[in-house]
Amino acid sequence: MTQHTPDPEDVFAWIDGAERAREQAGLVRALRPRPAHSPLLDLASNDYLGLTRHPLTVRGAREAAERWGAGATGSRLVTGTTELHAELERELAAFAGFEAALVLSSGYAANLAAVTALGDRDTLVVSDAGNHASIVDGCRLSRAEVAVTPHSDPETARKTLAAHEGRSLLVTDSVFSVDGDAAPLAAYADACRAEGAALVVDDAHGLGVLGEGGRGALYAAGLAGAPGVVATMTLSKSLGSQGGAVLGPAKVIRHLINTARTFIFDTGLAPAAAGAALASLRLLRAEPQRADRVREVAVELYDRLTAAGLTAARPDAAVVSVRAPSASAALRWAADCREAGLSVGCFRPPSVPDGISRLRLTARADLTGDEIVRAVGTVLRTAPAGATRMRDATA
């Protein structure tokens, strides 16, 4: 076997081949800096409640920065915890129905913190096959025994838990980011109770959308505050800011403070982000109808797109996923939408677990009826050949 010797003048020459492979597969990703005020109609962002630019949210960020400074100045255990962080944690826990909360720098960091701090070499972690990459990475970093079970299959999850002796936990998204479908949380919780396992749920796409007044999927399922349940979430979607949080029993939060590496060794969330999230949370509490509205918009998008012949997953929250014939077709479709004045998401492998590329439209509570009609019309006008045939093939 011939061993390849790297070129000492170009040790990254191997990247050229990787780039060519991505290009041939239609999987090249690129950054597209947007202006402060884009002319595009936005159905790509995660600003579900339309709060990112709300005057109260912006004022919350501005006032926090003016009072506390531009940065947290250090890790949360050194100088990075302000009274503002503590206030946000108290109000977030109370709103979502949990005993305590811990704010981190991102939702990604929150998932890593929860899974790695609650799992170790002696733990079994059962992970839904549709889980977000941050959960997958948390499982890998936990060094636990990890069993990936079929998507939304509580019976297989229960059997997997039952076969393990010792500590175990089941981790799942509440709403899956690819198709926007909701996890069977009640059945997963039953499986965990039956087998003495903890349940960890990433409610990134449920907070602000599901449950009474947007209190989240766990609240809607009657699981908020349950002793064996931990929630993670992001502040960057419905709350229009940035950051993440872990919610659960107070002793779990104390454990994370002492053991979660993405909390201990990371700089605290910037005060401006904490202030914006707190302002949005209070706004949602005062205007709970925003949660109802975003679900209505999602269903209307789905109804109009499928009535016109496209294949889409019925949304359980704010995400509307429309299937494309191929990765390259999805990329071209999203680009054509953008050229026509509409920004949509484009999901291709490896982001899609089933290998089927999609456009992802995110509903927003502040979309008008005219904007919904315009968005659907643009998606239909730019649809690639074969997009409607997919519906016939899967019917």
Image (cartoon, rainbow, N blue to C red):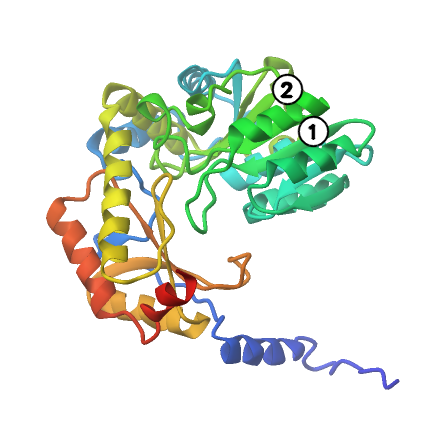
Q: How crowded is mark 1: few (under 14 residues within 10 Å), some or many (20 or more)?
A: many
In this rendering, position of residue 67 left or right of residue 222: left
Camera sees residue 268: no
Along the viewing direction, whichever of 357 and 160 lies nearer the viewer: 160
Residue at disc 1, secondary structure: helix
Camera sees residue 378: yes
Going by the picture, which residue comes out furthest to the left? Answer: 370
Mark sitting on residue 118: 1
Mark sitting on residue 195: none
In this rendering, position of residue 223 left or right of residue 329: right
Residue in the picture at 80% in, 82% down: 5
The residue pinned by badge 2 equals 252
Q: What percent of the width, then of the height, locates residue 54?
A: 22, 35
Sequence-wise, the earlier of marks 2 and 1 is 1
In this picture, is 67 found above or below 367?
Answer: above
Q: Quadrant of the C terminus?
A: bottom left
Residue at disc 2, secondary structure: helix
Along the viewing direction, whichever of 293 and 385 lies nearer the viewer: 385
**Image label count:** 2
In this picture, is 294 found above or below 3?
Answer: above
Q: Are marks 2 and 1 in contact (CB under 8 Å)?
A: yes
